[in-house]
Image (cartoon, helix red, strand yellow):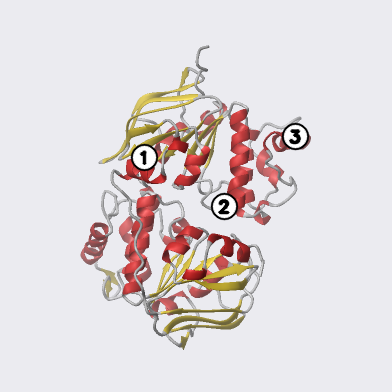
Amino acid sequence: MADPVPVVEMRGISKRFGAVQANEAVDLTVRPGEIVGLLGENGAGKTTLMNILFGGYAPDSGEILIGGRTVRIRNSADALAAGIGMVHQHFHLAPRLTVLDNLLVGLPGRGGRLDRAGGLARLDDIAARFGLRLEPDRLVSSLAVGEQQRLEIVKALFRGARLLILDEPTAVLAPDEAEGLFKALRAMAAQGLGIIFISHKLTEVRSLTDRCVVLRHGRMVASIAEPAKSTSAEMARLMCGHEIVPPTKPPSAPGAVVLQLDNVSTPPQGGMALTDVDLAVREGEILGVAGVSGNGQRALADVVAGMLAPSRGRLLIAGEAVEPYGPRRVQAMGLGRIPEDRMTQGLVTSLPLADSMVLPRIGTPAFSARGLLKPAAITAFVEAQIRAFDIRCPGPMARAGSLSGGNLQKALLARELAFDPRVLIAAQPTRGLDIGAARFVHERFLDLRARRCGLLVISEDLEELLILSDRIAVLYEGRVAGILAAGEASIERLGLLMSGAA
């Protein structure tokens, strides 16, 4: 019996951005019912390749075949018409509309009106076939992150996708949510859909995918026929071109308290508020914070960064209360910040990298005098950080938004560490990063710990917290459910605290 016609074939795809060769003669095939993993370091060309397939970029050379026929995909509308759906790391939803309205936007109606009855029937059919259930009348702004991602997937299926591209789909999901996603993806594959799965979580890749393609520096360097029989170490070596050894955490003797939340509560806002939170971070210590997404992590990060004033309680840095309260004050007191969303809170992606890397301190004597900038000093500073942190970009004037996620995170680290912080708060510091970039971040954190900095690391990756932390606090419904020493902590014990079990 002849092999089925592939859902998609990409043949000899090449794409260059100035001096950077993002893709070079890449071939990729996905057959019906197949889940193909797409692996590579940050900046290896994965997202560029998928943006070409989804109509975001035009290839410089090569061709794309859908169902055996050559097509030209000029934009996302062409991709959707060809049966291609893509779920990006950053969701494209209208938060003020309902689930059903988000699904119907842009689709032809009936008699000049939205076909709500047809939409409800279609939504019920998708839920029955794939287990992806959503309440049609809920506002998107009220959905948890996992539910928003489910809506993005349903939106692609709603439009008739036969090929689904998922870019880091589990980066924002708790373990049980990720397992629910995998169950749905397997159901889709069983009904003949093709799936491209991009992830840096190699354990997930090995358990889910039927085959993997590995990119390095824009070229396809390997194909893994049976990922389940491979090891994460072997996959990491193919991605990076060398062995990845986890960092070692030497013993540390924590000193004086450098960051303290004293009975802090916060006013209700977009997410879960904090209630009576007491936490202390000592110099030379990494305090990890675990919790299922939406249990107060964002409020905690905002309070420590000076972005959200407590409604009760105090924030102290090195024993001194933060007054007046605000981000400039905590920065002046020696706090460095790696925000959760590097695209909107960390760097200004529309500006050159040099601007983003000096913006928080643009008024200091290092970068300006008498109201005038010092361009040579700014360029020298950014070039030095690019070299020190191996930030892969054309140079200081490259648009920040053109960098890969890993390189953006390196730029944020370089900016904050250059000024020798007394305390560092990092929220989801390796979300979406490949194994090599994550190891780089972990090494920098351990270097800071050795230099007697106190670190507060908020992460939903429990393995990351177990690698780094001296102690781990668990947030549940805005309260501290418990604090475990590193030697007492395990994924099972942390999971119980995260679920609200005492």
- In this view, the residue in front, 415 or 276, is 276
Label 1 residue SS:
loop
Which of the two discs, 2 and 3, sits closer to the camera? 2
As drawn, the label of residue 115 is 3
Q: Secondary structure at mark 2?
A: loop
The amino acid on which the numbered mark 1 sits, given as a three-letter code, is Gly
Residue 45 is marked as 1
User: In the figure, 217 relative to 424: above or below?
Assistant: above
User: Which mark lies nearer to you, 1 or 2?
Assistant: 2
Q: Position of residue 362 (x, y in %)?
A: 33, 70
Answer left or right for 297 relative to 349.
right
Q: Residue furthest right?
A: 117
Q: Residues within 10 Å of mark 3 (few under 14, many from 20)?
A: some
Q: Which amino acid is tagged 2?
A: Leu
For the residues carrying marks 1 and 3, which lies nearer the camera in this image? 1
User: In the rendered picture of this protein, how many numbered marks are placed on residues?
Assistant: 3
Q: Is residue 356 visible?
A: no
The residue where tag 2 is placed is 173
Q: Residue at x 76, y 33 (%)?
A: 118
Picture coordinates of residue 78, whole percent (x, y):
52, 28
